[in-house]
Image (cartoon, rainbow, N blue to C red):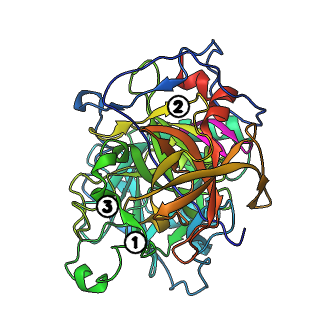
C-alpha cells in the first residue's frame, strides 16, 4: 500500500436497549494487557443496540479555578520553528499535532523549589504560581514529574489573558493517576509524569495551594518539558471562515470529506464519536478518534473503543482528552455545534492488543448528556461485499462520514511504527474496506466501522485519500477482539 491514514468512527443502531442473541463469535489470540480484571463469565450477548446517555447519568466537568490569583513567576520559551511532522502519518501511527520542548529553568526538584514563591492564601495555608509561555503554541500541556505531592494540595490551571478556561484537581487525584500508570506501565518516566490539560493558548499558569499545616518541603516535583501544540484544536468561531474556507470544510480535512451533520441517517451514531488528543510515550502530542460503547448491563458505563496504535499504555490513557459533538451546527455550515463539550480527566486502560489493533478504555469522567453509547455486533456479520459506513475526525477536523463496502479479509501486522497487510481469509483479523463516498485520513485512526447501526471494526490504517480513489483501508475485526477479551466488559 502506498500510504496509510488513521480514522475514527462511531456506530450504533436504534434507540432501544439490549437485544441479546447468543451466537457463536470468532476467536483468536491476544497480546492484550489490562489494568482491571473483571470476571471471565460466559458472555450474555453477541449483539447489542445503542442507548442514549440521559442527563441524570451525566456529570459536570471539573469547574474552572475561581480563587484569588497569587503573583506568578514567569517563564517564556521563544517561538518553536522546527519542521512539523508530515501531514500524512506513517501506516498504523497516530497523527502528531505537537512536540515536547525542554524547560531549562524547571528541570529538577531543586530548580522548581527555587522558582516558586510562596505567599499566604485566604484559607490560611500558602499558595504559589508559575506562568509558562511557549511562544506561538495553540495549546500547552505541562509534564509534571512528581517526586512527592501532598494529597491535600489543590492544583489549578488557568490563563493570564482573562479567559474563563480553567481546570482544578487535587494532589490525591494526581497521585492516584500516577499509581495507575506505574501499576500498568512500570516505573518509567512516562508513568511518573502527569500532563496538565490543554487550555488552548500559548500560556498556562500552574497554581498550587497547600492547606495550613502542610509544609512546602513536602512538595517535590519538576517540569522538565511541556507539549507545544502546533495545530489549532479549537472550534472555529470567526465569521471570516466563510471566506477562508470557501472551497473546503472548516478545518484541515480533504475536500472530498463529507460533513456528518448532513447525514441524518446516522444521527444517532454520530453522537457516540469523540475526537481524541493525548500524549504518547514519546511525550509527543497526537490526534485519533474513538467511539463510546454500550454494554449488556445498560448501566451507561463509559467504555470507549479506539486503536491500539493510538493508545496502548496507561500513561497515554491518563492524558486523554475527548471532544464531544465536535461538528458543524447544521449541514455544511460554518458554525460549530452549540453542544460541543470537552472532557479532560483521562481514562483507565482496560485492554490493548496489536492482534486486531484494538484498545478499550473506561473514561474517568462521564461524557455530556445526549451522547450515544454505540451498539455493536460480534456475530461475524462483517463479510465481503457488505455495505459499511464510518464516522471519524480526519486531520482532527469536524466529524465526517464515509460509505463503502468490505472488499476482502486481510492479514495485518503492526511493528516498528507502521502497519503492513496481505490478502487473508475468513479467519483473518482485519477487514479491507473501499470507499464510494468520502475517505479517511490521519486523525481518523481508531474510529469504528458500522453495519446497520452497530460497530463491527476499528480503523487501523490504509491507502485511501481524496487523491487516491480506489485506496483500501484496514479495520481490526470487532468480533475477534470481542471474543478475545472485550466481552469481559461489554457482555457481563
Image position, residue 223 (x, y; %): 58, 62
Q: Residue furthest front?
A: 385
Taking the spot 42% from the left edge, 70% from the top edge, the residue there is 73
| Residue 350 forms part of the magenta stretch | yes
Task: Give the position of the C terminus as an image quadrant.
Answer: top right
Label 2 vs label 3, nearer the camera:
2
Residue designated by label 3? 70
Image position, residue 374 (x, y; %): 42, 36
- Give, as a single range, the part of the protein colored magenta: 348-359
As helix, strand or loop, the secondary structure at mark 1 comes to strand
Task: Give the position of the N terminus as an image quadrant.
Answer: bottom right
The label number, if any, that marks residue 203 in the structure image: 1
Judge from the rendering whether residue 274 lies leftward or rightward of residue 433; answer left or right: left
The span from disc 2 to disc 1 (Cα, nearest Å) is: 45 Å
**Disc 2 crowd, CA 10 A, few/some/many (<14, 14-19, 20+):** many
In the picture, residue 452 is in which quadrant?
top left
Judge from the rendering whether residue 136 lies leftward or rightward of residue 190; answer left or right: left
The label number, if any, that marks residue 49 in the structure image: none
Residue designated by label 2? 377
CB within 8 Å, label 3 to label 1? no
Let me know if residue 427 appears in the view: yes
User: Where 422 sits versus 200, above or below?
Assistant: above
Disc nearer the start of the sequence (2/3)? 3
- Pick the front one: 386 or 254: 386
Judge from the rendering whether residue 203 lies leftward or rightward of residue 181; answer left or right: left
Label 2 vs label 1, nearer the camera:
2
Taking the spot 31% from the left edge, 50% from the top edge, the residue there is 121
As helix, strand or loop, the secondary structure at mark 3 comes to loop
- Pick the front one: 61 or 330: 330
Amino acid at each position: 500500500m502506498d500510504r496509510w491514514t488513521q480514522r475514527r468512527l462511531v456506530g450504533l443502531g436504534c434507540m432501544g436497549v439490549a437485544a441479546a442473541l447468543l451466537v457463536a463469535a470468532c476467536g483468536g489470540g491476544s497480546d492484550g494487557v489490562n489494568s482491571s480484571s473483571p470476571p471471565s463469565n460466559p458472555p450474555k450477548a453477541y449483539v447489542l443496540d445503542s442507548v442514549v446517555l440521559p442527563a441524570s447519568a451525566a456529570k459536570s466537568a471539573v469547574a474552572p479555578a475561581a480563587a484569588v490569583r497569587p503573583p506568578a513567576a514567569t517563564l517564556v520559551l521563544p517561538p518553536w520553528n522546527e519542521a512539523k511532522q508530515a501531514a500524512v502519518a506513517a501506516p498504523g501511527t497516530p497523527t502528531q499535532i505537537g512536540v515536547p520542548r525542554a524547560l531549562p529553568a524547571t528541570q529538577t526538584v531543586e530548580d522548581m523549589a527555587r522558582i516558586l514563591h510562596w505567599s499566604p492564601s485566604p484559607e490560611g495555608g500558602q499558595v504559589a504560581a508559575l506562568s509558562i509561555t511557549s511562544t506561538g503554541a495553540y495549546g500547552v500541556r505541562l509534564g509534571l514529574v512528581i517526586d512527592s505531592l501532598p494529597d491535600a494540595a489543590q492544583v489549578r490551571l488557568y490563563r493570564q489573558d482573562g479567559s474563563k478556561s480553567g481546570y482544578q484537581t487535587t494532589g490525591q487525584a494526581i497521585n492516584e493517576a500516577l499509581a495507575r500508570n506505574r501499576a500498568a506501565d512500570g516505573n518509567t518516566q512516562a508513568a511518573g509524569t502527569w500532563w496538565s490539560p490543554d487550555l488552548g493558548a500559548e500560556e498556562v499558569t500552574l497554581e498550587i495551594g497547600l492547606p495550613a499545616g502542610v509544609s512546602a518541603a513536602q512538595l517535590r516535583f519538576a517540569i522538565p518539558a511541556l507539549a507545544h501544540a502546533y495545530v489549532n484544536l479549537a472550534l472555529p468561531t470567526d465569521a471570516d471562515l466563510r471566506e477562508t474556507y470557501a472551497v473546503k470544510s472548516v478545518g484541515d480535512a480533504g475536500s472530498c470529506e463529507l460533513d456528518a451533520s448532513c447525514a441524518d441517517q446516522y444521527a444517532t451514531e454520530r453522537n457516540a464519536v469523540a475526537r481524541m488528543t493525548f500524549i504518547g510515550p514519546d511525550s509527543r502530542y497526537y490526534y485519533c478518534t474513538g467511539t463510546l460503547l454500550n454494554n449488556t448491563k445498560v448501566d451507561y458505563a463509559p467504555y470507549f473503543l479506539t486503536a491500539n496504535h493510538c493508545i496502548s499504555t496507561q500513561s497515554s490513557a491518563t492524558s486523554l482528552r475527548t471532544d464531544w459533538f465536535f461538528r458543524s451546527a447544521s449541514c455544511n455550515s460554518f458554525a460549530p455545534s452549540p453542544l460541543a463539550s470537552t472532557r479532560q480527566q483521562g481514562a483507565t486502560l482496560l485492554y490493548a492488543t496489536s492482534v486486531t489493533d484494538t484498545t478499550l478504555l473506561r473514561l474517568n469522567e462521564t461524557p455530556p448528556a445526549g451522547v450515544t453509547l454505540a451498539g455493536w455486533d460480534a456475530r461475524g456479520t462483517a463479510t465481503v461485499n457488505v455495505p459499511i459506513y464510518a464516522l471519524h475526525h480526519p486531520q482532527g477536523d469536524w466529524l465526517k462520514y464515509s460509505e463503502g463496502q468490505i472488499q476482502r479479509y486481510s492479514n495485518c501486522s503492526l511493528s516498528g511504527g507502521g502497519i503492513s497487510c496481505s490478502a487473508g481469509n475468513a479467519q483473518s483479523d482485519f477487514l479491507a474496506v473501499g470507499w464510494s463516498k468520502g475517505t479517511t485520513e490521519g486523525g481518523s485512526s481508531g474510529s469504528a466501522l458500522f453495519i446497520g447501526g452497530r460497530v463491527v471494526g476499528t480503523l487501523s490504517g490504509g491507502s485511501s485519500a481524496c487523491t487516491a480513489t480506489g485506496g483500501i483501508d484496514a479495520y481490526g475485526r470487532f468480533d475477534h477482539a470481542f471474543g478475545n477479551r472485550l466481552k469481559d466488559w461489554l457482555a457481563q
